[in-house]
Image: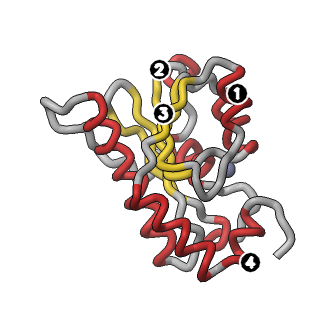
Amino acid sequence: MTEVPAVSSPPGLSPEEQDRFYLALAVEQARIGWAEGGVPIGAALVHEGKVLAVGRNRRVQMGSAIRHGETDCIERAGRLPASVYRHSVLYTTLSPCSMCAGMALLYEVPRIVIGENRTFLGAEDLLRSHGVRLDVLDDRDCIALMQRMIAERPALWNEDIGEEP
Ligand SMILES: [Zn+2]
């Protein structure tokens, strides 16, 4: 494993406050990615309250075709037993695309907390049809990051979702 923050949410938080806490780690990753010249999307993988990994879209930074926020996060968590994924929550700043949704389905991640799905609606129907619980927090920081991305780097964003520039 690499860059694993030894983080759990502070005690005494409500379930929604816990979700906001973990989503904030994903938002932090998205901000780092934007500052690096990349796509501002981040993710965190949390197993029974413990953060296993965080990640961010690093297609630009790594010259990668598949390093989305979610795939980068799962990759950085390293090889894990199947049972760990099945008891984990994936936090992501943006509604997962079909590639990332497929990854979550492969590893049977039961729940995904989504920062927002206004600027991009991913494969949520696919995930729900497989019984994945989705919670969309409609987070203003996540929306602002994507709106800025789409306004300032539209060609890069289109590339990210497989569209022509
Ligand atoms: Zn994706």
Q: Where is residue 112 in the image (x, y as percent from the top left)?
A: 52, 33
Q: Where is residue 116 in the image (x, y as percent from the top left)?
A: 51, 49
Q: How crowded is mark 2: few (under 14 residues within 10 Å), some or many (20 or more)?
A: some
Q: In this view, does 111 lie above or below 4?
A: above
The residue positioned 55% from the left and 22% from the top of the image is 110
Q: Which amino acid does label 3 sit on?
A: Asp
Mark 1 or mark 4, whichever is nearer to me: 4
Q: What residue type is labelled 2?
A: His
Task: Specify the label residue 155 is tagged with.
Answer: 4
The residue positioned 32% from the left and 48% from the top of the image is 5
Residue position marked by numbered label 1 in the rendering: 106
Q: Residues within 10 Å of mark 4 (few under 14, many from 20)?
A: some
Q: Is ligand 1 closer than 8 angstroms to the Cβ of mark 1?
A: no
If you read the primary sequence from the N terminus, does the residue marked by circle 1 or circle 4 appear first?
A: 1
Q: Distance between the residues labelled 3 and 4?
A: 29 Å
Q: What element carries label 4?
A: helix
Q: In the displayed orientation, state which residue is furthest to the right.
A: 164
Residue position marked by numbered label 3 in the rendering: 135
Q: What residue type is labelled 1?
A: Leu
Residue position marked by numbered label 2 in the rendering: 87
If you read the primary sequence from the N terminus, does the residue marked by circle 2 or circle 3 appear first?
A: 2
Q: Is mark 2 on a helix, strand or loop?
A: loop
Do the residues under discs 1 and 4 have CB atoms within 8 angstroms?
A: no
Q: Quadrant of the C terminus?
A: bottom right
The residue positioned 35% from the left and 24% from the top of the image is 48
Q: Distance between the residues labelled 1 and 4?
A: 30 Å
Q: Where is residue 117 in the image (x, y as percent from the top left)?
A: 58, 49
